[in-house]
Image (cartoon, rainbow, N blue to C red):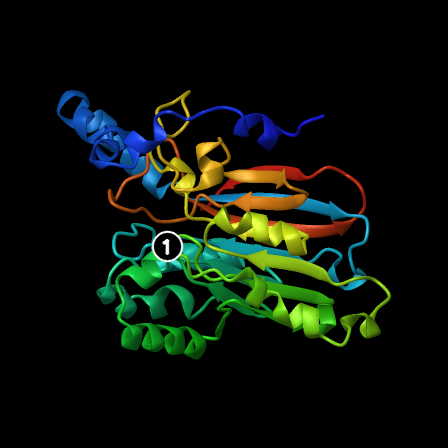
Amino acid sequence: MPDKLTTLFTKEISRRDFFRGAGGFIVNHWLLSLLPVGGAGVLGWAEHDTRELQSEMWDLFYPKLPKSLEGKTVCQLSDLHLETLKISPQRIFQTTMAQKPDLLVLTGDIISTRTDLDKVDSYLEKLSAPYGKYVVLGNNDYSHLSHTLLKRFLKQLQGLGWIPLINESSFITSLNLWIIGIDDPATAHDNVDQAYQNLLTAKTPLSTSQTPPFCLALAHSSDCLDDVAFYGADLLLTGHTHGGQIRIPGLPPLITNTYLGDKGIYEGYHVIQGIPLYVNRGIGESVIPLRFNVPPEITFFTLHQGNASPKHQTKDAK
């Protein structure tokens, strides 16, 4: 029986090429054309949605989960876009730390301009987790920085306690956990072969446990999925789509900027090619500093041993 993705792939998306051009910008950001008509009502709705931070809570179950990961919580932040972010550092801190995450990951697009480097500390410095903080870069992190400023940015992140994974992986022995960091697929910086190299050459982390290590893969965009599926992952966390950022109620977004997004997979939890994939809506905005019908999110994944289906609930952040 074909899975959802196979069925979706049989459908031609004739709009795609048009939306990639200049006309796509106008159509995708239809909110601009509504402002003179809808006035303060539409703008007020969008302002509300832009600030309506939500906590997405997921319980995920794995038959062969290492005992060391039972009940552990991974928190994912994505797409802060600090240039226009309207949510305060304190609110992000409180929302994140209220769940006492064991591991923090950040899946790219932290900045939107060079001047955002001055804002990074206030948002990322105080966040903490007992098993570490890991980050991969997104297209905007690359687009506005020279090689020199990129090196400064990476050193800045390291100075704040974040571990950048640039097509590389890190093993946390006490958790029997591999974290695989894939560089930005949207700008063709991804090299999944290189990112998995440490796993392939490791003598065998199984010496610490009879249970195979859990593999957590991080990437800004889901466009690396084919290569990740070749090697395997127990969970792939991505962002980039913003969930569409602006969506007419009852209709899918017109632009999601990913291959899977064109097929209708632009937010939330999916299993594609045998890989559990999560597409995070992100926290900030791009191009237009507004969200409409797509609230920002911080996501928490609590891991359990078992065969149950994923469980999910949404909580409004205070």
Q: Quadrant of the N terminus?
A: top right
Please say whether residue 266 is visible from this viewpoint: no
Q: Which residue is mark 1?
A: 80
Amino acid, disc 1? Leu
Place of residue 32 in the rendered image (x, y in percent of width and height, measured from the top left):
19, 31
Left or right: residue 227 versus residue 65 is left
**SS under mark 1:** loop
Q: Nearer the viewer, residue 240 or 56?
A: 240
Place of residue 120 in the rendered image (x, y in percent of width and height, measured from the top left):
34, 67
Q: Residue at x 55, y 60 (%)?
A: 192
Place of residue 70 in the rendered image (x, y in percent of width and height, measured from the top left):
76, 57
Q: Residue at x 51, y 62 (%)?
A: 191
Left or right: residue 37 versus residue 174 is left
Quadrant of residue 59 in the image? top right
Q: Nearer the viewer, residue 265 or 51?
A: 265
Q: Nearer the viewer, residue 178 or 35?
A: 178
